[in-house]
Amino acid sequence: MIDKKRNSILFSILGLALLFMFILDISLGSVTIPFKEVFTSLTGGEASKSTWEYIIINYRLPKAITAVLVGVGLAISGLLMQTLFRNPLAGPDVLGLSSGAILAVAVVILGAGLLPSFLQSILVSSYTLVLASTLGSTAVLLLVLLVAQRLRNTMAILIVGLMFGSFTSAIVGVLTYFSSAEQLQKFTFWSLGSLGNLSWSSIAILAVCVGLGLLLSAASIKPLNALLLGENYAKSMGLNYTRVRLIIIFATSILAGSITAFAGPIAFIGLAVPHIAKLTFQTSNHAVLYWSTFFYGGIIMLFCDIASQLPGLDTTLPINAITSIIGAPVVIYLLMKKRNFQ
């Protein structure tokens, strides 16, 4: 009873924190907009300045929504992978989905130099990069699903994902060696991740993909609790282990693949947020961990987006760098504070 009351209070705090960070993210930037104006604009009213209204609706609101979708999606996919593989170091990229996306984008950007100049401008566009990233992730997904059907050992799937990541890194390294400075710069900028520059139609597609992945994840909460005690115990409880494993892999693939396609590869969130949720709520029950990870993912991603904007300046730092700089020390501190964490 005490735990339920405590969890209810914590969830209320996290919900309010998510709302606060969402409005704060829209308010801060190169042009600071008062909270009241942001709230008025978001609730259907008009801001006192037309420029503020334009900035909120066309730039900051899409970016804040993208931050929430990315944070939630990567955090939940990280939770799924850590439970499935029973490995605290597993993340959404453990299946090689991000590696497949990176390889496809590298082929488009770095391989464009082999084509005539007029084709390069057509090939290297934002839509082409999203399409290439999606195809790369999908190809790896199909490979992983095929391997999952052939291999009974879950750890073998993990090793296949890691090996595929090493393989793609090697190919990207070869492409990098033969690329020009301009091509390397474009590829580097993409690999650093970005939450901005997404149209409303792109956000809608991303929201549908993330929503589908979250629904599949929520439907797997009870099987995830059974998997904590081991594969054999889960089977003894009547769990269809093969089907559940495929659903979890498919959900992770949708979440990580779609996010990488639209926002680029973003580090730390999927690996660290589940640990923060576990340490805060001190439970292994996925009915609690699912929602705590959900809220923490959105809050931390919004915080990283705010930190990357450097309020008052025109400079925006790469979101991928901010997630790692802020996240890694926090996780190390939490793990050292809770020494018996498993």
Image (spheres, rainbow, N blue to C red):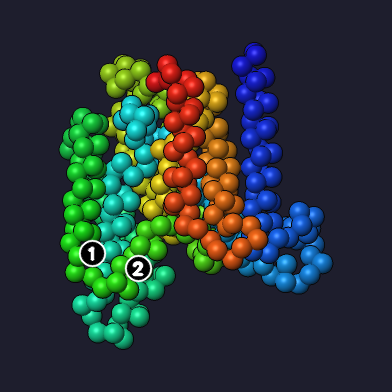
For label 1, the SS is: helix
Q: Position of residue 171 (x, y in %)?
A: 19, 58
Q: Position of residue 300 (x, y in %)?
A: 55, 42
Task: Identify the image quadrant of the C terminus.
Answer: top left
Residue 51 in sight in this render: yes
**The residue under label 1 is which amino acid type?**
Thr
Q: Residue furthest front?
A: 313
For label 2, the SS is: helix
The disc label shown at residue 243, or none: none
Task: Please determine whether, in this image, residue 191 is positioned above or below residue 221.
Answer: below
Q: In the image, what residue occupies the spot 31% across and 86% down?
A: 118
Within 10 Å of disc 1 (Cα), the crowding (few <14, some 14-19, many 20+) is: some
Q: In the image, what residue occupies the spot 80% across and 62% down?
A: 45
Q: Quadrant of residue 138?
A: bottom left
**Side of 19 relative to 147 (left or right):** right
- What residue is pinned by disc 2? 185
**Side of 68 relative to 21 (left or right):** left
- What residue is pinned by disc 1? 176
**Residue nearest the observer in this picture, 280 or 246:** 280
Residue 214 in sight in this render: no
Task: Please determine whether, in this image, residue 275 is positioned above or below residue 163.
Answer: above
Q: In the image, what residue occupies the spot 48% across and 54% down?
A: 319
Task: Please determine whether, in this image, residue 290 is positioned above or below residue 109.
Answer: above
Choose the circle earlier in sequence order: 2 or 1.
1
Q: In the image, what residue occupies the spot 35% across and 80% down?
A: 122
